[in-house]
């Protein structure tokens, strides 16, 4: 078995004296693990860092085997992302969240979105909003996508300001007014094409509360595990920048 693809490194852990098991999110082959022989060498270590984009060649005798990777660095983001606490926590959270995808199941849209977020993760003006959109994309890929296109009660696409925690659908201001204390805030930058191009701190807080509710209830609680602490660490670090 043999294939070549591009992939983002999610993790790399030592194996034996000189090798490393690398976990990638690839464009066409999904989340995939492989052994890099000699991966702990001085020349390989800078390449095998989370966040880096690599060209991966995978070989194995049988498809179900771990197989071997030969990796070539394409975009080495890791050193830049290690310069600030927020981007360090953000990278860890993105890797942890992406690891929820089933192994070897292609998710090309997630791959593209992950690359976009990583390219801007150290820019705190836009990174939090991009990360919220990535969380929404992951909810969708995992089967729990939100419908923010029209009001659940009236069908209108105007004046959407809430999200129903029960259905995950948007709710207009008029329809939701009697139930405002039971609804989740929908920030402007997540409505339609994103009318608010520069969300303020309240919008970002509302966005993280929105995605956090559904991630906790639909993704982590059924697995019997809490949302990783690194998510809260990123949110706190980004707010301090």
Image (cartoon, rainbow, N blue to C red):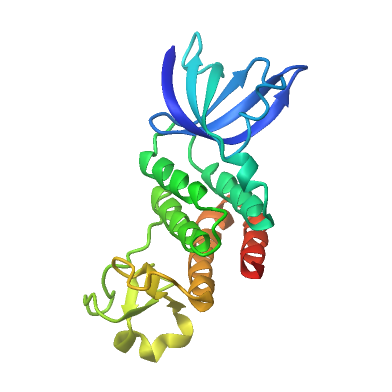
Is residue 122 visible in the rendered image? The answer is: yes
Q: Position of residue 233 (x, y in %)?
A: 68, 60
* Vertical position of residue 165 compared to residue 144: above or below: below
Task: Residue 102 in the image: state x and y as whole percent.
Answer: 48, 37
| Residue 33 occupies quadrant | top right
Instruction: Name the outermost residue toward the top.
Output: 61
Res. 225 visible in picture: no
Picture quarter with the C terminus: bottom right
The residue furthest right is 17
Instruction: Estimate the x, y position of residue 181 in percent, counting from the top left.
Output: 48, 86
Instruction: Give the camera-side residue of 222 and 54.
Output: 54
Q: Residue at x 47, y 82 (%)?
A: 182
Q: Quadrant of residue 171?
A: bottom left
Residue located 35% across and 85% down the image: 176
Is 42 on the left-hand or right-hand side of 157?
right
Give the residue at x 68% y 15%: 38
Height in image: 130 above or below 29?
below
């Amino acid at each position: 078995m043999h294939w070549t693809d591009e992939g983002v490194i999610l993790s790399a852990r030592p194996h034996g004296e000189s090798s490393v098991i690398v976990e990638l999110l690839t464009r066409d082959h999904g989340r995939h693990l492989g052994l890099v022989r000699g991966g702990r060498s001085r020349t390989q270590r800078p390449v095998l860092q989370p966040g880096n984009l690599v060209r991966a060649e995978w070989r194995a005798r049988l498809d179900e085997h771990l197989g071997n990777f030969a990796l070539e660095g394409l975009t080495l983001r890791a050193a830049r992302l290690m310069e600030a606490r927020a981007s360090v926590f953000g990278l860890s959270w993105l890797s942890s969240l992406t690891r929820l995808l089933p192994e070897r199941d292609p998710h090309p849209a997630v791959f593209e979105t992950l690359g976009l977020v990583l390219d801007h993760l150290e820019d705190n003006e836009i990174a939090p909003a991009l990360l919220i959109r990535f969380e929404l994309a992951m909810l969708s890929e995992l089967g729990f996508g939100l419908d923010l296109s029209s009001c659940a009660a009236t069908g209108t696409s105007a004046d959407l300001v809430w999200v129903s925690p029960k259905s995950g659908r948007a709710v207009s201001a008029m329809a939701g007014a009697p139930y405002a204390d039971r609804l989740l805030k929908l920030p402007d930058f997540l409505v339609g094409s994103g009318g608010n191009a520069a969300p303020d701190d309240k919008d970002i807080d509302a966005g993280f509360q929105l995605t956090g509710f559904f991630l906790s209830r639909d993704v982590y609680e059924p697995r019997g595990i809490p949302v990783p602490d690194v998510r809260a660490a990123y949110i706190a670090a980004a707010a301090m920048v």
